[in-house]
Amino acid sequence: MFAQPIPPAIKSHIDIQITLYTDLTRRTLEALQSLSELNLQLGRDLIAEFGANIQRVMASKDAAQLGSAVGAQLTPGWGALQNYQQHLVEVLSRANSSLAQTAATHMPAVRRAATDAAEEIMHQASEQTARTAEQMSKYQMASELRH
């Protein structure tokens, strides 16, 4: 095959696609960073709550205090998990909004570039078809002259 240069419309379409995917990837990584920070905070909260519960057990002076402290151990991290769930919804909602906004911002350019690329391909195909038809016509004429 002969090396052909990439038509400008197709190159533009590829560049726009790369820009779109780069921006979407950036937004996804930002969401993952927020999610990682949230997970770290959950770990810190759970460790702090477990530490506080153990201190209460160790500091118990009578059976009532010990029973209360042990009871708190039965539902460890409840408050931290509720807080995590609320913040998780916020992080995912922001990520969804950011991705949708990024896609919406790029879609007009993507549509234009795709249309331009399709038109370029159709134009090239038309030209190639015309050249091939012309060559076939010349070949048929030459063939008829020989016979």
Image (cartoon, grey):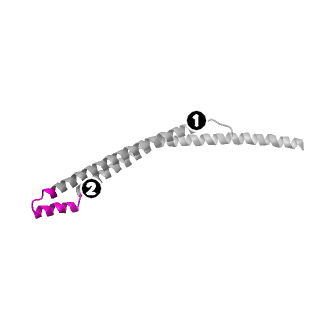
Badge 2 crowding class, 10 Å Cα cut-off, few under 14, some 14 to 19, many 20 or more, is some
Q: Quadrant of the C terminus?
A: top right
**Which stretch did the figure color magenta?**
56-77
Q: Secondary structure at mark 2?
A: helix
Residue pictured at 81% horizontal, 41% vertical: 139
| Callout 2 amino acid | Leu
| Callout 1 amino acid | Pro
In the rendered image, which residue does mark 2 sit on?
Answer: 81
User: Is 92 left or right of 69, judged from the image as shown?
Assistant: right
- Residue 69 in the image: state x and y as whole percent: 16, 60
Please tell me which residue lies in front, 132 or 51. Answer: 51
- Residue 27 in the image: state x and y as whole percent: 40, 43
Residue pictured at 74% horizontal, 41% vertical: 132
Circle nearer the viewer, 1 or 2: 2
Upstream in sequence: badge 1 or badge 2: 1
In the rendered image, which residue does mark 1 sit on?
Answer: 8
Please tell me which residue lies in front, 118 or 13. Answer: 13
Q: Residue at the left extreme?
A: 62
Q: Give the main secondary structure of the magenta stretch.
A: helix
Q: Is residue 75 above or below residue 130?
A: below
